[in-house]
Amino acid sequence: MIKQDLLDFSFDELQDFCRDNNIPKFRASQIWSWMYCFGLKSFENMNNVSKISREFFNNISFISRPEISEMQKSKDGTIKWLLKLNDNSEVETVYIPQDDRGTVCLSSQVGCTLNCSFCHTGTQTLVRNLTSGEIVGQLMIVMDHLNDWPSGKNNRKVTNIVMMGMGEPLLNYDQVCKAIKIMMSEDGIAISRRRITLSTSGIIPNIEKTGIDLGVNLAISLHAVNDELRNKLVPINKKYNLENLINSCKNYPKLSNSRRITWEYVMLKDVNDNSEDAINLIKLIRGIPSKINLIPFNPWPGSFFEASTQKKIDNFAKILMCAGFASPIRKPRGQDIYAACGQLKSNSEKIRKSQINKLVPIHNF
Ligand code: SAH
Ligand code: SF4
């Protein structure tokens, strides 16, 4: 008999599973709480569940974690995990500690089909969707490592989640949606929708749905303000162009000054970093509650773009600020371990070998 991984269940599915196995429904609440409030990985210590029930669960199910292939710590405190999944494919997960928060960056796919020209993940050939259990499992690994259980304690280390790792979350909508609901569940990990941000390159058919189903913060990987350039940088723009993208963002549910869209804009030297681009950006998003995140380009081996100069980035930010837009410049985190935006790529044997001296591996499993 194939055992069921309980991490792949929504709460309703866990209840159905209990019912189908003639286990009283209330056991679902108990198990859910042990898994997601206390982070238990086995049934053994679930002390309000009778021994017989624990044995029964053990015979028919298990609570998984991805296998840790490698864990690296950057000198700035950022931690990156390379995680191995059941089919031996690998994804990366990053934890970024900051003064006022701790953010986990989760992957939604192995690789990405969209081939944005400045993104390392897009160069990976093997691509598949992650299951919701594999998405939640990444967060569980981080919480295990940081001793961040029980989830209800004060001073949690993981306070925020960004779907900004490998993959395009809105091309794996159902599993991503299920995973985010599990992570938001108040009887479990309980991370509020206000502290979750989903980043998309602009898969228009699922944008409004995301707002309705999940109500999380939306980030759009914009990177260019005209179709000609965006077609080159973010090729999915040929299918979902700027005009339609902006319109679907205008309709994102519950936008207000306290719930703004984040526009991500990677600063590429002499490509999209002129004053004129900044002015056109302002025109494009006028009227939409917005903040703009300027991301210095993070190079990777073989990339043919260069990062904009600091002067250009500052000038760009100044123009946006004068027009009233909050436009923080994203500080690259974990660059020394290739954990920064757009640097994730899991079958990275070559890179790891050539960069091995620069890395600070803290575990090799
Ligand atoms: N696929 C989704 C989410 C993952 S990428 C998306 O594209 O939105 C997270 C962010 O990093 C995106 O804004 C992406 O465009 C940006 N990014 C990709 N490669 C980068 C690089 N080399 N340097 C800086 N940012 C990069
Ligand atoms: Fe995929 Fe996002 Fe990278 Fe584009 S930027 S290739 S959508 S992961």
Image: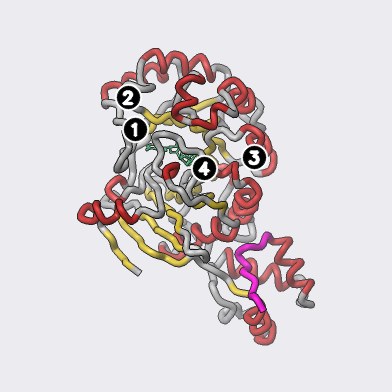
Q: Residue pushed farthest bottom?
A: 52
Q: Nearer the viewer, residue 130 or 319?
A: 130
Crowding at dot 3, Cα within 10 Å, few <14 / some 14-19 / many 20+, comes out as many
Give residue 113's mark.
4
Pointer 4 residue Cβ closer than 8 Å to ligand 2: yes
Compared to residue 217, the image places residue 273 above or below, namely above
* Badge 2: residue crowd in 10 Å (few <14, some 14–19, many ≥20): many
Quadrant of image for the N terminus: bottom right
Residue 110 belongs to magenta span: no
Q: Are marks 1 and 2 in contact (CB under 8 Å)?
A: yes
In this view, the mark in front (4 or 2): 4
Res 119 → quadrant: top left
Asked whether disc 4 touches disc 3, contact meaning CB atoms under 8 Å apart, the reply is: no
Q: Dividing the image into 4 quarters, which one contains the C terminus?
A: bottom left
All told, the count of numbered labels is 4
Q: Residues within 10 Å of mark 4 (few under 14, many from 20)?
A: some
In magenta, the rendered stretch is 1-10
Q: Which residue is mark 3?
A: 210
Which mark sits nearer the N-terminus, 4 or 2? Answer: 4
| Amino acid at pointer 4 | Thr
Q: Check disc 2 and give the amino acid type.
A: Ile
